[in-house]
Image (tube, rainbow, N blue to C red):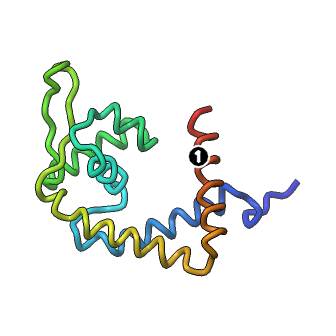
Amino acid sequence: MDFIKEDSAGYLINHMARLFARELQLGIAPLGIVVGQFPILLELWQKDGVSQKKLLENIDVEQATLANTLNRMERDGLIKRTKSQADARVQLIWLTDKATAIKDQAFDVAFDVNSRALQDITLQEREIFMGVMRRIIDELRYR
């Protein structure tokens, strides 16, 4: 059996994700952030002061990748870390004022990328597409 990339869900999803990432990067670069930081910022904009373990669970990346990204974000003044008062072994990740200040602009960029990418499909197709993607993510995440 031949592998035909155009018929592979994994290939198409990966290709689409890279295109989304490219467009997002073009828009957020002026804000001083990169695509790899965006999922972390989304989590922290939703709930600030979470543990590295909680971030890891929510964004599905390798521990080393998250640690390196957090180090860069701290260096760039986007986050700060504090020890948990409940457990001194746990560090909590907090947004800085710099990261909080770019939230609305970053959301605008993400909204624009999504809008442009989905502009040629109907609302019903969008709902189906989003639902199918969520089901696939759940299937692969909880294996």
Q: Amino acid at mark 1?
A: Ile
* In this view, 109 is above or below 45: below
Vertical position of residue 121 compared to residue 142: above or below: below
Depth check, front residue: 103 or 72: 103
Q: Tell me where residue 139 sits by quadrant.
A: top right
Closer to the camera, 97 or 126? 126
Residue 138 at x, y percent in the picture: 59, 41
Give neighbour class at mark 1: few <14, some 14-19, many 20+ (Cα, 10 Å). few
The answer to which of 46 and 92 lies nearer the viewer is 46
Residue position for label 1? 137
Residue 82's place in the image compared with 113, above or below, is above
Q: Position of residue 87 (x, y in %)?
A: 19, 18
Q: Residue at x 14, y 28 (%)?
A: 83
Where residue 29 sits: x, y (%)? 28, 70
Residue 120: percent from left, percent from top: 60, 81
- Residue at the location (40% across, 70% down)? 111
> Which image quadrant is residue 7 in?
bottom right
Q: Which residue appears farthest toward the front when viewing the image?
A: 124
